[in-house]
Image (tube, rainbow, N blue to C red):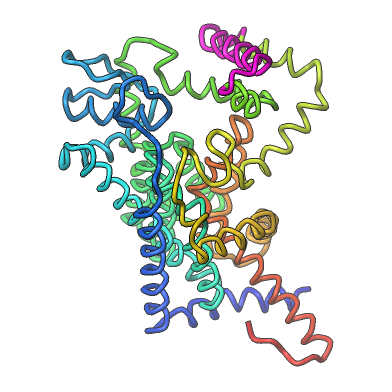
Amino acid sequence: MTSLRMTDEKSFATDPSRQNHGWQWWLLLLLIGLFSLGFRYYYLIHAQVFQPADLPNARADAVDYYRYAQNLVHHGVFSKAPESQSPPFGDSFRDPGYPLFLAGWLKFSPQWDAWYSAVLMSQGLLSALSVVLALCLGRRWMPMRWLAAAGILMAIWPHSVSIGSFLLTETLFGFLCVLGMFLLDQALHRRSAAWAMASGLGFALGALTNAVLLPFAPLLGLYFACRRQISAAMFAGLLAGAMILPAAWMMRNTLLPHSPGNSSTGRALDNLVQGSWPIYHQAYQASMKNDPLAVATMTRISQESDLIQSDPAAGLAELMRRMGHHPIEYARWYLSKPALLWDWDIRMGQGDIYVYPTRNSPFKDNALYRSAIAVCHTLNPLLFLLMIAGGIVALWPRQQIPRSLVAATLLLAFVTTVYSVLQAEPRYSIPYRPLEILLATFAAYRGCRWLASMNTKRGSKPVHL
């Protein structure tokens, strides 16, 4: 066992870094990047999504983001209120990152058609760049042939492709997550406080797009500092970069009138209540079809959400009382939520890989895309198991594992825990799919190395991986 561990440590210190240099690496990066971009642009050009965010009385997340962008451009106020002639009141219900992204394009292209096209094309570019950055992140984790396999899988993963056609945060947020991890990898490799601060800023921008990420960078810096794997200057840089912008946003929110229904805290409490009901997704879907039992269930959930927002202590007591009547059922529910998060079918939407109704999807009409979705759907449960295995290997004591790999593992464990406590929905895992694929590929790589080592010990011909 000792000799195997020493062999693996030596491979981490030499093989990936030695193999992933030179023109072959840059050619791989270029080819995967261009393929990812082309694969997404073909989808975006052909798929037709029904998300009328610009129409009166429309609802759903995309409408909120569009209204935020409108109010930012026309009134300079961050508000999801329907646009009017008078300036609306500000709120903090949604995080500001994605509305600012939309507002930038709205300022540049005020007409709906031009603005909508610009947003979708830019999201396709960000999604392709996420694949490129993920490859750069995994460069020190495994040899190039394994990176190539991971890159192809990331390039064709259907959720990552289709999400770019929706006016939702996941594409921008996923890019910022991978950007923060890539900058952290550079900081760890260079032992640079400046790069650590840049990484913190990347995570801060991600946190301002999705507040789930807010505690992660400080906790990660504390983890590395306690293990003496980063200097005090790097820790301070990471902390400063991660906290300056979110702190300014939180100070702004403290100046707003108290309104639980229009605050991010209220939204988190809503998710806590909704995520505690095992039948929430089914009831939501059935209530859209006016099923009376589902409507009654949704009414009970709304009443519980109203209670926890008006009186958090009483709301939590009611939640615990309800779960206390069926403890085994709820224990099973919460234990199953990690698998639900990384499952395939989107629950709060049209199902499969679609959040909003989509026509002419290449994943239905094109042979290459149909093959891609068939392969990825089959691999999805295996990827989840390999991700867990890769995480165990990465966090196993007394191994010389790249610290960026440890950081990526901790991020995946962190978000899985948070969403399992709140609301687990496969849509929410989409931003982290590149990291899941990287970690799963790493687990397959290590498994093959272990098998090759066993064959060598038995006198078989060694296999070069």
- Tell me which residue sits at (41%, 44%) in the image: 173
- Magenta stretch: helix, strand or loop mostly: helix
Q: Position of residue 194 (x, y in %)?
A: 31, 55
- The image shows residue 113, relative to residue 88, as above or below, that is below
- The image shows residue 134, relative to residue 121, as above or below, that is below
In this picture, residue 82 sits left or right of residue 182: left
- Tell me which residue sits at (61%, 60%) in the image: 374
Verify whether residue 123 appears in magenta. no
- Tell me which residue sits at (29%, 27%) in the image: 68
Q: Position of residue 154 (x, y in %)?
A: 50, 61
- The image shows residue 217, relative to residue 133, as above or below, that is above
Of the pair 414 and 33, the residue shown nearer to us: 33
> Image quarter for residue 29?
bottom left
Of the pair 331 and 15, the residue shown nearer to us: 331
Asked whether residue 91 is in view, the answer is yes
Asked whether residue 248 is in view, the answer is no
Q: Position of residue 120 (x, y in %)?
A: 32, 48
> Image quarter for residue 397?
bottom right
Count up the numbered dots.
Answer: 0
Of the pair 187 and 355, the residue shown nearer to us: 355
Image quadrant holding the C terminus, namely: bottom right
In this picture, residue 309 sits left or right of residue 239: right
Q: Position of residue 80 (x, y in %)?
A: 32, 22
Q: Which residues are magenta?
A: 288-314
Verify whether residue 298 appears in magenta. yes
Image quadrant holding the N terminus, namely: bottom right
- Tell me which residue sits at (74%, 32%) in the image: 333
